[in-house]
């Protein structure tokens, strides 16, 4: 899909995507580029939007410093919603990071287009890594510009103790899934916690509940070549699945934020919550006594022949080297380390994420469960991996559309048609 992504990048550059606002970067007194001190001391600044992972990363970088005498890693985090602008401004000036955490897939392209990152093709070998993860770290020119940090997956989290108490089991068919929801609802327990006020979560909800209905990875191939589009009956039916399951969601679902939904789940007011692997640490912290499990939602009726329960995934939170770093060699060495199993294992153990590094093991049983599910039957989080290369982004369109459907303002056909029209304003299928 390099051809269409290249055209999308040109459009994104024309529109000015990713260009920072003046004054958004922290002052030099807060976060200067790494500077060497007396005795060969070097301070490398690493920027991230993962405020919630501050303590975990500090522990990881302490381990790196212990093995690299003279190097100090200064890890700084910023509010996620402001990070893109802060990073763009920082990378364009002298106060940016040596090693920035960067976005993936389409959202990485404006940073690459700005000329801010050092190509890594001759520095780092990702042979044997998951193709989906490697694709997230490349530019539309085919070059590698970052090292993938984590593979995020989406799945249904559930409260094991609550289901056991109610005599319910993990469903293996759609009929079982519906029956379980009905039983919970009859017992005045919200079956599925969803916070539809935050529309960005709704494409994830859609993937968890209905990926087999549109065909998962097979649909990705068909839409990439133009054989199908988002008006396809299977896609429309998958959107309708979310609408049909609204009765199992909180009554005021469109008024609830994602954090409200998490609280419903951790306070045991709701039995299940569809979410990303990145939610696990938050859910565990919210109720350390709860035994959390995950499962793949069974394929809904009418799913294309051969469709099975699937775990959608993508790569997120990659690390790169800034061209303006005054310590290119040291920064490159740190990023090389981020491609090692040692770093990947610490990401799994401390950050509680599914590391992108092959061969990592998981002491947390839920992380291990999610990793096995993704390995067994993976599919792409399609609107993120393939439809964020232009504006409007596919995830934005579907998120808003499903929100409007849950409000009763649009139906599945309208939501799908507007998604199709929006992405076709910049997306061009590849030729077979």
Image: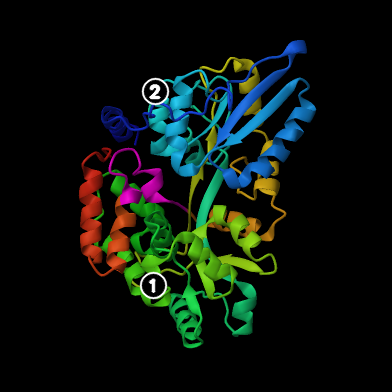
Relative to 386, 83 lies left or right = right
* Cα distance between the residues tagged 1 and 2: 43 Å
Q: Is residue 143 visible?
A: no
Numbered range of the magenta stretch: 379-396
Relative to 229, 271 lies left or right = right
Q: Secondary structure at mark 2?
A: loop
On screen, residue 151 above or below 284:
above
Q: Residue at x 42, y 61 (%)?
A: 205
* Colour scheme in use: rainbow
Label 1, residues with CA under 10 Å away: few <14, some 14-19, many ≥20: few
On screen, residue 110 above or below 60:
above
Q: Nearer the viewer, residue 356 or 274?
A: 274
| Residues at discs 1 and 2 in contact (Cβ within 8 Å) | no
Q: Earlier in the sequence, mark 1 or mark 2?
A: 2
Q: Which of the image's four quarters has the C terminus?
A: top left
Q: Residue at x 26, y 54 (%)?
A: 230
**Residue 303, position in %: x, y?**
35, 67
**Residue 320, position in %: x, y?**
54, 28
Q: Secondary structure at mark 1?
A: loop
Magenta run includes residue 12: no
Q: Which of the image's four quarters has the N terminus?
A: top left
**Residue 222, position in %: x, y?**
30, 49
Looking at the rendered structure, which numbered label has been put on residue 380? none
Looking at the rendered structure, which numbered label has been put on residue 252? 1
Q: Nearer the viewer, residue 266 or 13?
A: 266
When asked about the image quadrant of residue 15, the answer is top left
Q: Which residue is mark 2?
A: 114
Give the label, 1 or 2, closer to the camera: 1
Label 2, residues with CA under 10 Å away: few <14, some 14-19, many ≥20: some
Q: Residue at x 61, y 78 (%)?
A: 162
**Residue 384, position in %: x, y?**
40, 46
């Amino acid at each position: 899909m390099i051809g269409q992504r290249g055209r999308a990048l040109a459009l994104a550059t024309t529109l000015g995507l990713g260009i920072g606002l003046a004054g958004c970067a922290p002052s030099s007194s807060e976060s200067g580029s790494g500077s060497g001190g007396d005795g060969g001391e070097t301070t490398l600044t690493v920027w991230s939007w993962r405020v919630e992972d501050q303590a975990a990363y500090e522990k990881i970088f302490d381990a790196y410093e212990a093995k690299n005498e003279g190097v100090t890693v200064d890890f700084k985090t910023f509010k996620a919603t402001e990070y893109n602008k802060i990073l763009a401004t920082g990378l364009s000036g002298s106060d940016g990071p040596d090693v920035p955490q960067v976005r993936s897939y389409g959202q990485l392209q404006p940073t690459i287009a700005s000329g801010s990152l050092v190509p890594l093709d001759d520095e780092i070998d990702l042979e044997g890594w998951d193709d989906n993860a490697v694709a997230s770290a490349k530019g539309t020119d085919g070059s590698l510009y970052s090292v993938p940090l984590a593979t995020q997956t989406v799945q249904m989290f559930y409260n094991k103790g609550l289901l056991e108490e109610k005599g319910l089991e993990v469903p293996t068919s759609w009929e079982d899934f519906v029956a379980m929801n009905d039983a919970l609802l009859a017992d005045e327990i919200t079956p599925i916690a969803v916070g539809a006020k935050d529309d960005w979560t709704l494409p994830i909800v859609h993937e968890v509940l209905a990926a087999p209905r549109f065909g998962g990875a097979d649909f990705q191939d068909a839409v990439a070549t133009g054989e199908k589009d988002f008006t396809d009956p299977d896609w429309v039916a998958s959107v309708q699945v979310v609408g049909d399951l609204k009765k199992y969601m909180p009554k005021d679902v469109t008024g609830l934020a994602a954090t409200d939904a998490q609280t419903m789940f951790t306070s045991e007011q709701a039995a299940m919550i569809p979410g990303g692997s990145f939610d696990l640490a938050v859910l565990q912290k919210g109720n350390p006594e709860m035994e959390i499990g995950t499962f793949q939602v069974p394929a809904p009726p009418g799913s294309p022949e051969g469709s099975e329960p699937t775990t959608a995934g993508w790569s997120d939170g990659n690390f790169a080297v800034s061209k303006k770093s005054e310590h290119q060699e040291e920064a490159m060495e740190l990023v090389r380390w981020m491609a090692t199993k040692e770093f990947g294992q610490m990401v799994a153990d401390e950050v509680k994420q599914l590391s992108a590094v092959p061969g990592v093991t998981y002491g947390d049983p839920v992380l291990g469960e999610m990793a096995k599910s993704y390995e067994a039957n993976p599919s792409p989080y399609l609107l993120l991996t393939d439809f964020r290369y232009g504006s409007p982004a596919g995830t934005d369109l579907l998120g808003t559309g499903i929100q409007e459907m849950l409000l009763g303002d649009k139906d599945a056909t309208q939501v799908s048609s507007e998604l199709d029209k929006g992405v076709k304003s910049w997306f061009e299928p590849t030729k077979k």
